[in-house]
Image (cartoon, helix red, strand yellow):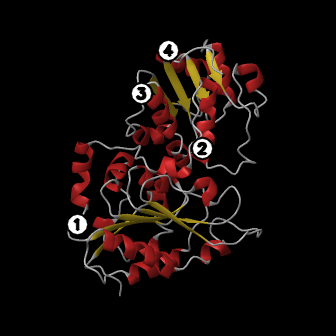
Amino acid sequence: MASQLPKTILLSRIDNLGDVVLTLPMAKVIKQHWPECQVIFLCRPYAVDVVAACPDVDQVITWQVDQTDQQVMRVLAEVQIDTIIHVFPNKQLARCAKRVGIQQRIGTSHRLYHWWTCNIRPSFSRAKSDLHEAQLNLQLLSAIGIDADLSVDTLSQSIYLQPSLSQQQTVQPWLDPNRFSLVLHPLSNANGREWPLENYVALCHKLDSERYQILLNGVEAERDRLAPLIQLIPDNQQLFSLSLADKVALFAQCDGMVVGSTGPLHIAAAVGMPVLGLFPPKHTMNPKRWQPIGPKARYLVDNVDCQQICSNTDCACMEALTVDQVVEVICEWYNAASFEIGAIK
């Protein structure tokens, strides 16, 4: 239990984009309990634009991989925090937080270095848990007196990323108001199992271009791998050139997204758009741990207990998810959005 009521809390999550998004409900819960508490978020530079869209975060600061201890300590000292929660453990950051004199330093007891760098050490294991990642993050709040034992369904009812109206207006020209805007994000930057690219191609052929505007999302480094899809999708429907801030704003206005278990899945869910996540059933990769958290989020997973050895681009369980299954979900979205029925060829 925390020894004092925090006035300024630093949430540290300095790893992947999806993990960052699933940490943001912590900020919402903190604000619900203590509206006057200042919540500061520490992340990698590439995640700043996403965290900045969270209204429950008061300030965003960044951590660089190559920073010296002195540089890290300078950053921590400037924000004058009294509590730090190491949501993603990092030895250097834990050491610097102690040296700079932060009063309450919270980190899981399952990291040996936390025993001499943290003075509050809740005990739980992510690797052996069946809880969702967002639920595991919330468990750390018990160390400051917040009981946040929330179900995934409860968490999914809230939208916790809200891009500004001006940002949304900036990206509106990308969207055709007369068609259903569907974002496809096929790749995962090697962070998750991928649905075969040929299935995305087949999906494009199934959708009537007069009724569906297909938007292809990815990064410049993925252009070569995405060549089969790029040939099918016009240049003005490829989102490679958009900044992450623009993409967050665009997703908030799109009608649907199909994506694997990767960062854009969680961003789309968090802005409240209909999103379909495609998952393998493997433990630590399955929807029970990583399903999207949002009011219109869904997922598909092959209902088997897979023990096969596979890779991100060669997964039999992902291949088992059919194009027709995905089309069925898109049809439901289309009809719910009051578009003309019968858009599938």
Front residue of 288/165: it is 288
Sequence-first disc among 1 and 4 = 4
Residue name at image x 62 percent, y 30 percent: 142
Report the quarter where the C terminus lies.
Answer: bottom left
The kind of secondary structure element at disc 2 is: helix
Sequence-first disc among 3 and 2 = 3
Query: Which is closer to the viewer, label 3 or label 2?
Result: 2
Disc marking residue 80: 4
Disc marking residue 135: 2
Residue name at image x 47 percent, y 41 percent: 47
Between the residue at mark 1 and the residue at mark 3, the CA separation in whole angstroms equals: 34 Å
Sequence-first disc among 4 and 2 = 4
Label 3 sits on what residue type?
Gln
Label 1 crowd (10 A; few <14 / some 14-19 / many >=20): few
Between the residue at mark 4 and the residue at mark 2, the CA separation in whole angstroms equals: 28 Å
The kind of secondary structure element at disc 1 is: loop
Give the quadrant of residue 144. Answer: top right
Label 4 crowd (10 A; few <14 / some 14-19 / many >=20): some
Q: Is residue 24 visible?
A: no
**Image location of residue 272, percent across then percent down:** 38, 53
Label 1 sits on what residue type?
Asp
The kind of secondary structure element at disc 4 is: loop
Disc marking residue 59: 3
Q: Report which residue position mark 1 lands on.
A: 176
Q: How many marks?
A: 4
Above or below, 122 against 288 in this view is above
